[in-house]
Image (cartoon, rainbow, N blue to C red):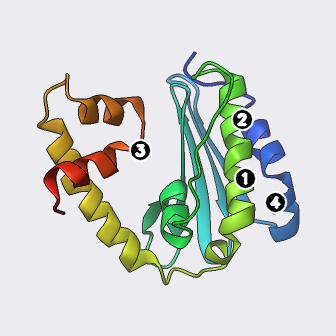
Amino acid sequence: MHGYDDFFKDVEIAFQDLILKRRPKIILKSDKDFGNYAVELCFKNSKLTFDLDRMNLQCNLINIKDLSEYSILKIVSILHPEKQIKFFTNEVNETRTSVVDYLNFLNDIIEKYLTNVLDGDFTWSDQYITKAKEESTMIKRVLDLEPSDIIYQKFWKGDESWKDDLLLRFKQF
C-alpha cells in the first residue's frame, strides 16, 4: 500500500482540538497515481505539513516568514532536552493504524510542547541549525563505520544511543 484516501480524515481527527482552537487553513494534496498524500495546517506564523509517501509519514513545521523547515521531534529535543520522547506503537510499520498512532503522538507533542512555536516563536532556530550540522557530521562518521559496528547497527535500527556512543568513542564534534 502506498497511501490511502482516508489519510486526510485521519489528520483532521488526530488534530481536531488544535484545528478547532486555532482555525488553520487546511490544504489537502494528493497524487493518487503514486500514492502520495499531504496535508498542510496553515497558521498565522507557521505551517504544519504532513506528507504520506508509500506509508512513510513525515511531519514538519515551517516558519512562514522565511520558509525554513524543521522536524517536530528535533524542535522538542532543543526546547526540552530533558525529555526523552520516543514514538512507540504495537502495530506493524506502514499500516494505517501505525500512521494514525503516529499522528496522535505528534498531536500530543505539539499540544504539550510547541504551541509557542505555532504562534511564531522561532528564537531557537539558530540552535536547531547548529545541532543539525553537528548531527550531519556525526552521521557521516557513522556511515564510514563497518556494518558490524554496534554504533552503525544502532543508527540503522533507530536507537538514538548511537550518538552518545559515537561521542564517547571519538570524543569530538
- Quadrant in which residue 47 is drawn: bottom right
Q: CA distance from mark 2 to mark 4?
A: 18 Å
* Secondary structure under the numbered disc 1 in the rendered image: helix
* Secondary structure under the numbered disc 4 in the rendered image: helix
Tell me what residue is drawn at x 38 percent, y 76 percent.
127
| Apparent side of residue 22 relative to residue 63 in the rendered image (left or right) | right
Marks 3 & 2, CB-CB < 8 Å contact: no
Please report whichever mark, 3 or 4, sits nearer to the chain's N-terminal start: 4
- Amino acid type at circle 2 is Asp
- Amino acid type at circle 3 is Glu
Q: Which residue is mark 2?
A: 101
In the rendered view, tell whether residue 129 sits above or below residue 154.
below
Number of the front mark, 2 or 4: 2
Q: CA distance from mark 1 to mark 4?
A: 11 Å
In the rendered view, tell whether residue 145 sits above or below residue 82.
above
Tell me what residue is drawn at x 79 percent, y 38 percent.
9
Please report whichever mark, 2 or 4, sits nearer to the chain's N-terminal start: 4
Q: Which label number is shown at residue 107?
A: 1
Q: Which residue is mark 4?
A: 19
Quarter containing the C terminus: bottom left
Please report whichever mark, 2 or 1, sits nearer to the chain's N-terminal start: 2
Please report whichever mark, 1 or 3, sits nearer to the chain's N-terminal start: 1
* Secondary structure under the numbered disc 3 in the rendered image: loop
Quarter containing the N terminus: top right
Q: CA distance from mark 3 to mark 2?
A: 20 Å
Q: Which residue is mark 3?
A: 160
Marks 2 & 1, CB-CB < 8 Å contact: no
* Secondary structure under the numbered disc 2 in the rendered image: helix
